[in-house]
Amino acid sequence: MPKPQVWNLLMTTPEPCYAHGTSSIPLLGETIGAQFDRTVTRWSDRPALIGRQQDVRWSWRQLGQKVDAFAAGLLALGLEPGDRIGIWSPNNVEWVVTQFATAKAGLILVNINPAYRLAELEYALNKVGCKALVTATRFKTSDYIGMITGLAPEFTTAVPGALRSSRLPELRIVIEIASEPSPGAFAFEHIIALGGSSGHTRLSETGHRLQFDDPINIQFTSGTTGQPKGATLTHHNILNNGFFLGELMRFTELDKVCIPVPLYHCFGMVIGNLACLTHGSAIVLPGEGFDPLATLQTVAEERCTALYGVPTMFIAELDHPEFRKFDLTSLRTGMMAGSPCPVEVMRRCIRDMSLTEMTIGYGMTETSPASTQTRIGDPLEKQVGTVGRAHPHVEIKIIDGEGRIVPRGQPGELCTRGYSVMLGYWNDPERTAEAIDRNGWMHTGDLATMDADGYCNIVGRIKDMVIRGGENIYPREIEEFLYRHPAILDVQVFGVPDPRYGEELCAWIKVRSSETLAADDIKAFCQGQIAHYKVPRHIRFVDEFPMTVTGKIQKFLMRQQMTEELGQAEQRTA
């Protein structure tokens, strides 16, 4: 009877947390420039780029002319394929032109966070050796030209294109997005006019030499621990990720995609611009930075069919006082990503914003970014309560602390492998080796589970997991429960040091404007509904959460503040 025994053993062995995204659609084997030319030819008269704040409406043909001219101008300045060129700007049409033009010229675009200040700018430019920088004049409280001058006083007297700075030794060229640029800078429009026929010839020759595995983009990670790392991505990485994201949202040339997320981040430039490029869809920019009212106005006026955002953006739109004034029935799809998506927020998007085909995605800068995504037609509970299944041509697995794949349903670290994994961190082999193992798996640092159908759920960061008296607690679970309270607008849960249990739970809560809550109300809401050790001991009501420009919540700052506050309280009572 040996065979039946073996068969029974196999039948009872838990299925492992491994999946790969099968697809009958092959990967794109070309550069971004080649795809751009194909799109311009195929959909030349269709809308390509709508910049609401700049009153710009360009067809693909018009965008193609701008992109080719700017790319030729960059080459005419003496830039060579492989040179790094930074862009430091909020969302605008020049950002889009720069992204496609640098790809066509083989220049590596370096995305610089619009919120960066002096030390961060200096680090980013020097870390990757930027030879050129495209910059806005200013944005909100940031005086970009003033900061450049602060780092490089030589800029004010330099001949444009010939900067020599002791603190920015590689930087030669500054291109300002302004009609009247500062001394030492070229005007953006001047570069468009610079190329000439010889520049266009050189651009064509350059395009034929480029390979899709060439690096084309460097994006800095958030740098919450240590200095930011420059994730280096290829044409193949980001073009294919954008394409398959668009495929799963069923984009066509008839779609208009509203992009209020920052272009400097992969959400904007890949999920946004490249998903549109590969499908002939229109890129719609509602403003320089996120504004919920401007976003709602843009969707209604332009009849956008897709909308992007992190959860905090959708919350701001849904709860805007004028929300009910706008006709959003043109919407059907889009993506919520960037941080864990509360189930109740997703349900409201589907119900109140006509986003019946809305998708949730998960990824990271180092993976181009998406590794998983929900599918249109998924059951509602999968659509709103998971981050979807493995992306086409991508593998995922969930492992324990010893690197072993865990059974379905058990939490562990999510790892991903495939075409989307970055080349590495720029000039940083040690940290690259820490992130990508010898088998090519990217270790995300995120805790996840996988169900029997292959759908994943992110339960937190490895560093965010709270261990209270030996019990492992995942803050995401507590957050999802608290979102059910009708008076809670938003909530973040994290761990703080505790002398008795090692760690205790703390909840920061934003209450709806028309409601009032006390800590005892929260504890009463939890009583008998979740285990006692999952009930937050410390509760604070706040107006805002600290977050990055891209809308990611910075729990480490909350933890620092609460740890200091609780420590001071203990000293006062000692």
Image (cartoon, grey):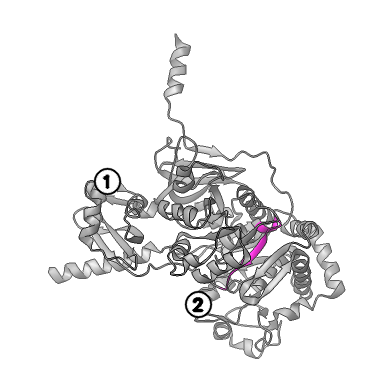
The answer to whether residue 441 shows anywhere in this view is no
Q: Secondary structure at mark 1?
A: strand
Mark 2, residues whose alpha carbon is within 10 Å: few (<14), some, or many (≥20)?
A: some
Name the outermost residue toward the bottom.
Answer: 157
Residue 437: say if magenta. no
Residue 280: say if magenta. yes
Residue type of the residue flagged with mark 1: Glu
Q: Which residue is mark 1?
A: 471
Instruction: Provide residue 196's location: percent of width, then percent of height.
Output: 84, 75
The residue that appears at 67% across and 79% down in the rendered structure is 175
Instruction: Provide residue 44's location: percent of width, then percent of height.
Output: 78, 61
Image quarter (top left, top right, bottom left or bottom right) of the N terminus: top left
Report the magenta residues as a range: 276-288
Instruction: Provide residue 471's location: percent of width, then percent of height.
Output: 27, 46
Q: Is residue 348 above or below residue 3?
A: below
Question: How many numbered discs, if any?
Answer: 2
The residue that appears at 21% across and 54% down in the rendered structure is 524
Query: Between 130 and 558, which is closer to the camera in this rendering?
Result: 558
Mark 1, residues whose alpha carbon is within 10 Å: few (<14), some, or many (≥20)?
A: few
> As drawn, is 467 to the left or to the right of 382?
left
Q: Which mark is residue 117?
A: 2
Q: Which mark is residue 173?
A: none
Residue type of the residue flagged with mark 2: Arg
The answer to whether residue 27 shows anywhere in this view is yes
> As drawn, is 49 to the left or to the right of 227?
right
Location of residue 109 (image quadrant): bottom right
